[in-house]
Amino acid sequence: MSRIPTLLLLCSLADLILILNSALLVNSNGLALRLIPPYSPESPLFQRNLSHEERIKRYVFQSDVRTNHLTATSSSNIRGRIDVQLFHYIVKVGIGTFKSKPPYKEYHLEMDTGSNLVWMQCEGCTKCFNQIPKPFPKEKSSSFHPILIKNMLKTYECEYEDGASTRGVLARETFYLRSNSGGLATVKNLEFGCGLYNDMQYGNYRNNKIAGIMGLGWGDPSFAKQLSPQIKGKFSYCLPVVSKKTPSTYLRFGDDIEQSKNFRSTPLYRMNISSSYYVDLQGISLNKTRLKINPKVFEFKNNGSSGGCIIDTGTPYSRIITPAFDILKLELVKYFSRFKNLKRRIGDLGLELCYERSKPEGFKNLPDLTFHLGGSQAADFVMKPEAVFEVVRQSRPMKSREYFCLAMVKNTKMSILGSHQQTNQRIVYDTMNKRLLFYQEDCSKIP
């Protein structure tokens, strides 16, 4: 018997929350999907009693795990198993065709801009994690069609940096995205992985609702690539400042993405066979003063394992290549030495540079940072203080104090523009033209 063809994938996990059951169907070439931010009670992964400081610690931890995945050179680089992360986009979709009302089954999938495969746990799995509802009953769906190669089932294997994995068969199926008006956007013959051996930790959580993952990366199997002709290769988001009162925003596809004359543009790169989106980081400014950082420290290394800069929603806090981070940290120390009400603080949050204030000021008197990106014109990615720092308020008897920390961490291998640093920016991925478009926007006021 000939060997069954196998698709081997390196996959990864992402952050924040997206729910598709409130999708707005705009037209045949555009979708606007409601984004539910982290810590919203609407999230299937919501934890009610998580403090701000605990959230920061988990963001740092997730950033470490994500970076380990992005700098891994092969599927054999598996680290120790970790607890499932809690800062992901979650998509709720209808799948399949059944003799029922509605004629499909609804499932939550974790969305990932850094991986390609769309997959979910299927009925008949030999190793399964607990989930609500039960795994997808593929044999009962009239629109389920396994993909065959020489009359053999085409299979996949997907390994994650945290030690989790899934493998199964590749198939085509009908997906449904529900609109606010009650209508449905139907996606027929979408290729996805039907997971039959799933070593995932979702089931460790009571009443787990996560059934699999939806990839949005560069590769052909990704949701964005499969829909590329309809959405013109474009998707976009705008992330508000995360808090307990963070409003909803929208993930937009195709013609639903609004055009702006004020956007800046930088090339998007795909390095080797990576599913990640790379940009050309060339320098950093503190306020408007360019730091003396050699641009070569940001260059991509052709060995395929390090260097360069990735834009990634799955990394909460940006990672800055060590030589550049050390210069940035030194210049920030000089900047804050002018303020008499600040005291250097050594904490346990996992962030290197923190200061305690004698009185609360929020983000007042904190500087902007700019990432200088390559392109035919100036592509300055300007970050306001709320995208650069974390501010933590502490209430004590008779007095309130606060401290703030630089929400970035150094890394020896590469740089990553994380989701916290993308706060209040309209980000547009134009994959057909291989460009990243962006401009500042108040993401809390988007209709």
Image: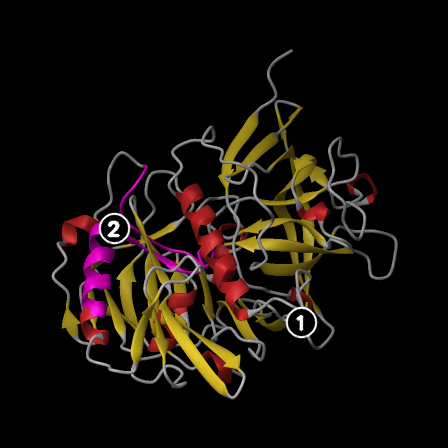
Label 2 secondary element: helix
Instruction: Indicate the amino acid at tag 1.
Output: Ser
Q: Residue at x 53, y 55 (%)?
A: 227
When asked about the image quadrant of residue 351, the answer is bottom left
When asked about the image quadrant of residue 377, the answer is bottom left
Q: Position of residue 362 (x, y in %)?
A: 40, 83
Q: Residue at x 67, y 36 (%)?
A: 198
Mark 1 = which residue?
22
Instruction: Indicate the amino acid at tag 2.
Output: Thr
Instruction: From the viewer's side, name the closer residue of 151 and 337.
Output: 337
| Residue 53 falls left or right of residue 377 | right
Which region shows up in magenta? 305-333
Mark 2 = which residue?
322
When asked about the image quadrant of residue 25, the answer is bottom right
| Residue 40 falls left or right of residue 320 | right
Instruction: From the viewer's side, name the closer residue of 176 and 440.
Output: 440
Q: Position of residue 295 (x, y in %)?
A: 15, 54
Q: Position of residue 310 (x, y in %)?
A: 35, 53
